[in-house]
Image (cartoon, helix red, strand yellow):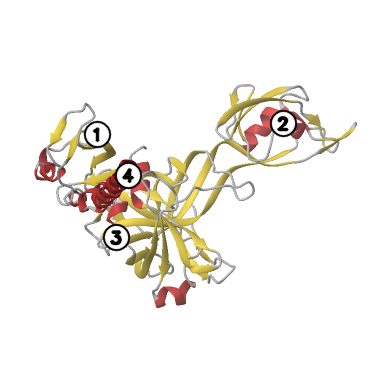
């Protein structure tokens, strides 16, 4: 009888404990702590509301273990003295969650939407293909035999920096068939290969059997520039070689004012294209200093005014955005930059930089009639929501040209300030 009573007591106490834990877990304060993001961005006006519903018995300690508030709601009242850093939320003295608080500044940018030409010269030369050579001994492929590959960036020959395709040919010919050491960049690594040129039977010139490219040009869209320093971001994605798909390592380049001469409409299975042109007489807008996965970056020669937002706009942080109506700024004809309606239909939470931050859908009948949706050449077109720069277009959905991926503007702006 005593054993049965004991078992009943234990079972009852266990049920009570489970019920208490369930109630605690469902309490507003516990839910608020559980739902806190890893990174919290705050400023003088907002961000603190994420902590407002959290009360005792929770406490907050800084990295040194020093308690900064008897409860998070009390810390909220001390917002003006709060410091950026990593904090630990504790329950009855035990750590339950860690958060990083970032005090964010308001950054003003001038949104773009201008169609620009992109002219770039690579560092060294990019190997875009390998081939064979007819010699007195038969067909040979010196570059391939040495281990070189399409996509390699040839930086130097015997320690002499390669200045371009013509310079590379001169350096190869100077060896008269003798070995030389080729230094290349491959997947972020610096590698060396010993290459033996072969004498071409047709003209007696030493060759190595490879095709190279030293420059590229195309059309894209200026996304924005930071008003305080004229550093800009454009395209929203890297400039890659058309043959190899490799991101180009640039030596120098410029963005140039482009004129739009037509549009090939996008449709399902075919992305469409803005057809633009620029030449030596076109206005030079700025330098290209870096080519990254988030776009090309550099410095404008002078400010560019956007008549739609002459005073500029604040930069939006990812947590400020929401699914719903937005604007897309772009140039698709001679009328210049115009604002078109779109909507953000998907947001991907990101604590660190990534290329695909959101998905948009074009809803503006005028833009749909002009382009069919998002087309090549619109990459970099800025997206605004609630008067702030939200992101920039990067890629169109091939099977649905009304939809496209965008990168968060914050990640592009952070690449700007690294210049």
Q: Nearer the viewer, mark 2 or mark 3?
A: 2
Q: Nearer the viewer, mark 4 or mark 2?
A: 4
* Label 3 or label 4, whichever comes before in sequence order: 4
Are there few (<14), some (14-19), or many (20+) residues within 10 Å of tag 1? Answer: few
What secondary structure is marked by label 4? loop
Q: Where does label 4 land, which residue?
A: 1
Q: Marks 4 and 1: in contact by CB < 8 Å?
A: no
Q: CA distance from mark 2 to mark 3?
A: 50 Å
* Label 1 or label 3, whichever comes before in sequence order: 1
Position of 359 compared to 37: left or right? right
Q: Residue at x 50, y 62 (%)?
A: 396
Q: CA distance from mark 1 to mark 2?
A: 58 Å
Q: CA distance from mark 4 to mark 2?
A: 85 Å
Q: CA distance from mark 3 to mark 4?
A: 87 Å
Are there few (<14), some (14-19), or many (20+) residues within 10 Å of tag 4? Answer: few
Q: Quadrant of the N terminus?
A: top left
Are there few (<14), some (14-19), or many (20+) residues within 10 Å of tag 3? Answer: some
Label annotation for residue 147: 2
Q: Nearer the viewer, mark 1 or mark 2?
A: 1
Q: Where does label 1 land, which residue?
A: 94
């Amino acid at each position: 009888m005593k054993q049965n009573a004991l078992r009943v007591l234990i079972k009852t106490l266990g049920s009570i404990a489970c019920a208490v834990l369930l109630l605690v877990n469902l309490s507003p304060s516990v839910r608020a702590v559980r739902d806190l993001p890893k990174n919290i961005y705050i400023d003088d006006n907002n961000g603190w509301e994420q902590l407002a519903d959290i009360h005792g018995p929770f406490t907050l300690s800084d990295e040194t273990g020093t308690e900064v508030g008897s409860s998070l709601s009390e810390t909220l009242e001390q917002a003006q003295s709060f410091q950026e850093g990593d904090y630990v939320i504790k329950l009855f003295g035990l750590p339950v969650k860690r958060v990083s608080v970032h005090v964010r500044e308001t950054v003003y940018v001038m949104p773009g939407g201008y169609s620009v030409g992109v002219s770039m010269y690579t560092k060294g030369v990019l190997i875009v293909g390998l081939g064979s050579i007819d010699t007195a001994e038969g067909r040979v492929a010196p570059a391939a035999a040495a281990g070189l590959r399409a996509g390699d960036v040839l930086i130097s020959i015997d320690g002499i920096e390669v200045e371009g395709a013509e310079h590379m040919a001169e350096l190869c010919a100077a060896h008269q068939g003798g070995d030389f050491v080729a230094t290349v960049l491959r997947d972020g690594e610096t590698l060396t290969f010993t290459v033996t040129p072969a004498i071409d039977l047709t003209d007696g010139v030493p060759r190595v059997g490879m095709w190279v490219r030293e420059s590229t040009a195309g059309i894209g869209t200026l996304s924005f520039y930071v008003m305080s320093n004229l550093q800009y971001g454009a395209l929203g994605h890297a400039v890659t070689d058309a043959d190899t798909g490799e991101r180009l390592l640039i030596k120098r380049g410029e963005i140039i004012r482009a004129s739009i001469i037509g549009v090939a409409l996008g449709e399902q299975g075919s992305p469409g294209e803005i057809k633009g042109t620029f030449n030596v007489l076109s206005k030079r807008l700025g330098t290209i200093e870096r080519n990254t996965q988030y776009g090309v970056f550099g410095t404008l020669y002078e400010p560019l005014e956007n008549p739609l937002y002459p005073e500029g706009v604040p930069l939006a942080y990812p947590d400020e955005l929401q699914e719903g109506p937005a604007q897309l700024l772009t140039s698709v004809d001679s009328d210049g930059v115009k604002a078109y309606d779109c909507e953000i239909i998907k947001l991907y939470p990101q604590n660190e930089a990534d290329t695909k931050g959101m998905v948009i859908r074009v809803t503006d009948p005028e833009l749909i009639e002009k382009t069919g949706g998002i087309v090549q050449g619109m990459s970099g077109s800025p997206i605004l929501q609630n008067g702030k720069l939200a992101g920039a277009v990067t890629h169109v959905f091939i099977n649905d040209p009304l939809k496209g991926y965008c990168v968060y503007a914050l990640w592009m702006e952070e690449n700007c300030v690294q210049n």
